[in-house]
Amino acid sequence: MLSTEKNKGKNIMLVEGPDDRTFYAHHVSEEHVVFSVLKGCYYMTFILTLVNKDTVLSDRVIGIKDADFDHITGRTNSLPNMFLTDTHDWETMTLTEESEHNIAIEVLNRSENGLFNKVMNDLIWYSYLKLYNQVEICEKGLECISFKNFAIKKIYDGDMACTVDDCLREVGKHNNNSRHAHFPKATDINRIKAAYPAPDLLQFTCGHDIVNGVVQRLICCKGKSTDVGEKEVSRILRISFRKELFEQTLLYKAIKNWADAHHTIVWAA
């Protein structure tokens, strides 16, 4: 990628997926950055480990990884050119009073105070299941629970909080997850909850889940289906998170410091 005339002198930014690229593209300098979109976070560490063995590439390639549960579990990153989001992912970084107001006005023509907090609290058992999956299954080398294409509406109607039993039943049926002997029971999820009893919800909740939960909440509040779906909610989050807000994040500052140290530019002026 860097050997082409078009990319000469540019830096490569690795991101986990297309949505991440769309978000960070609003903030990078197009003259200095080209994106490489991965299929999730799994390969980023391996790629950057290889990159850092090359003195030229290590000065030209960075990666932005969703923190996921790393800030909660205390998992550390030793790669100097891999940077974590301040919260669970870019979506949770953009959950401000302004973005909450803009989403509610767009759909309900009124404010809906506490919209984000309600959704995150209502989905807390689902988030505990995801934490269990990472800590007790994936990191121990067992086959991970598949959440791909799982529909939040199967466990959340936008009104009543989902229960641990609802989560286990529906996720267990999804892609036949319950076929595994290590698929958790309610006692397992309660045990992980006891280990992490009062999590910061912005660190704890997956942004995609919040977005889909917000859609369900809006339908519930409106009393009927709405034209505003996942893509539109994500768009409002992006445009509501103004440049000056992004510049206050630890992620922005860390990458700017890296760019300054390497005498290059990443972020747009």
Image: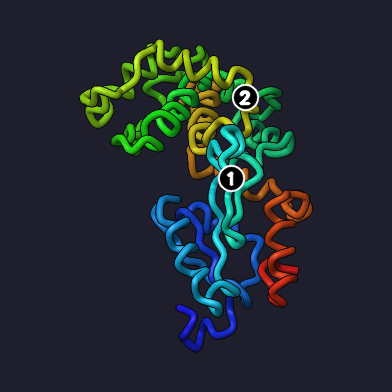
Residue 5 image position (x, y, % from top left) = 50, 88
Residue positioned 49% across, 44% down in the render: 231
Q: Residues within 10 Å of mark 1 (few under 14, many from 20)?
A: few
Q: Is residue 134 left or right of residue 169?
A: right
Q: Secondary structure at mark 1?
A: loop
For residue 76, which numbered disc appears in the image?
Answer: 1
For residue 238, which numbered disc appears in the image?
Answer: none
Q: Is residue 86 left or right of residue 189?
A: right
Residue positioned 49% across, 71% down in the render: 53
Residue positioned 41% across, 24% down in the render: 153
The amino acid on which the numbered mark 1 sits, given as a three-letter code, is: Thr
- Picture layout, residue 184 above or below residue 5: above
Quarter that holds the N terminus: bottom left
Q: Residues within 10 Å of mark 2 (few under 14, many from 20)?
A: few
Disc 2 vs disc 1: which is toward the camera?
1
Residue 181 image position (x, y, % from top left) = 24, 22
Residue positioned 74% across, 55% down in the render: 243
Residue 209 image position (x, y, % from top left) = 49, 33
Q: In the rendered image, which quarter is residue 88 located in? A: top right
- Picture layout, residue 19 above or below residue 61: above
- Picture layout, residue 124 above or below residue 74: above
Indicate how the structure is coloured in the image. rainbow
The amino acid on which the numbered mark 2 sits, given as a three-letter code, is: Pro
Q: Which residue is mark 2?
A: 199
Count the labels in the image: 2
Q: Is residue 139 left or right of residue 107?
A: left
Identify the mark nearer the N-term, 2 or 1: 1
Q: Secondary structure at mark 2?
A: loop
- Picture layout, residue 266 above or below residue 39: below
Q: In the rendered image, which quarter is residue 43 located in? A: bottom left
Residue 35 image position (x, y, % from top left) = 51, 67
